[in-house]
Each structure stands twice: as structure tokens, then as C-alpha cells.
Image (cartoon, rainbow, N blue to C red):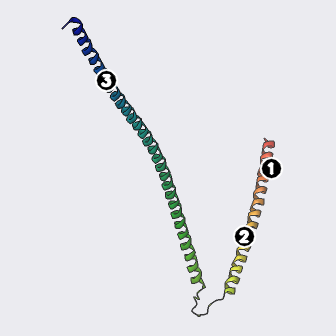
Amino acid sequence: MSLTAVNFSLYYNFTTTLLLLSRYFDFYTDQLHGHADEVFGLANRKFQLQQSMEERKHEIQVHRDVQRAAHKASQEERHRVSMESRSRQTKVKTLKSKYESLVAAARPSDGGGEEKSQAYFIIQAAQKREELQREGDELDGKIRRAEREMKALENTLKHLNDRNTRFR
């Protein structure tokens, strides 16, 4: 074999090897790009899922806060209604005891067995009111009289103090 044939054979082997290496390089580069695109897509999907999860967590927290506020409002309303119920029960007991005392007062206690009419109680209430009015007027008169006496005593004391000051 001659040198040119060996050179040609070596050149041919070298170029075919380069061509094969170029094909392998292109093949593996394409595979690498494909895997890189897949990894990038997965990373993007992961980021989107994380964003969705964060948004959902925020929505859940807002919903939880709304639920807590509603629960607190309902508890306060229940407490208010409970207090109002107790107040009304107390008023009912008070009115019931007043009614029972009025019914007991309306019963004949003298043993005559005679029931008194409504007009009797109205007249009795009017008489009691008139009596209280008269007592109030008497007390007002006494207060006015006492106020006049106090004023007169103050004037007398002032007069005596003035005289005492002049005497010195």
C-alpha cells in the first residue's frame, strides 16, 4: 500500500469518525435539550403549583377568619339573647308576685265571702292617691316653713355678727 492510499484510508477513517462523533454529539445534544426543556417545564409546573397552593392557603385563611368572626358574632348574639331572656324571666317573676299579692289583697279576709268589684278597687286606689297627695302637700308646706325659718335665722345671725363687729 502506498502512502497516499494509507493517507487516504486514514483520512477516510478520520472523517467517518468525525462524522459519527458529530452525529453522536447532535444526538446527545438534542437529548440534552429535550431533557433540559422537560426539566424547565417541570420546574415551571412546580412553581405554578406552589403559587396555586399559596393562593389556596390564603383563601382558606380568609375563609377561616370569616368563619371565626361569624362564630364570635353568633356567640355574642347568643349571650345577648340569654341575658335578655333572664331579664324577661325576672320581670315575669316580679309581675307574677305582684299579681299574686294583689289577688291575695282582693280576697275577702273578713270571712264574709263577698267578692269586691273592680269599682271598689278603683275607688280605693283613688282614695289612697288622694291621701298620698294630701300628705305630700303637708310635707311641702313644712319644708317651705322650715326654709323660711332658716332664712330668718341666717338673717338674725348676720345681723348679730354685724352688731358684734360694730361693738368691738
- Residue shown at the point (58%, 79%) measured from the top left: 99
Q: Amino acid at mark 3?
A: Arg
Of the two numbered discs 2 and 3 on the same chain, state the one appearing first in sequence: 3
Of the two numbered discs 1 and 3 on the same chain, state the one appearing first in sequence: 3
Classify 8 as above or below 23: above
Pointer 2: what residue? 136
Q: Nearer the viewer, residue 145 or 1?
A: 1
Counting from the top left corner in percent of width and height, residue 17 is at 26, 18
Q: Amino acid at mark 2?
A: Gly
Pointer 3: what residue? 23
* Mark 1: secondary structure: helix
* Mark 3: secondary structure: helix
Give residue 114's quadrant in the image. Answer: bottom right
- Residue shown at the point (31%, 26%) measured from the top left: 28
Mark 1: give few (<14), some (14-19) or many (20+) Cα within 10 Å. few
Counting from the top left corner in percent of width and height, residue 134 is at 74, 74
Q: Give the Cα distance between marks 2 and 3.
A: 124 Å
Return the mark for residue 17. none
Q: Please identify, in this view, whether the residue under mark 1 or under mark 3 is nearer the observer.
A: 3
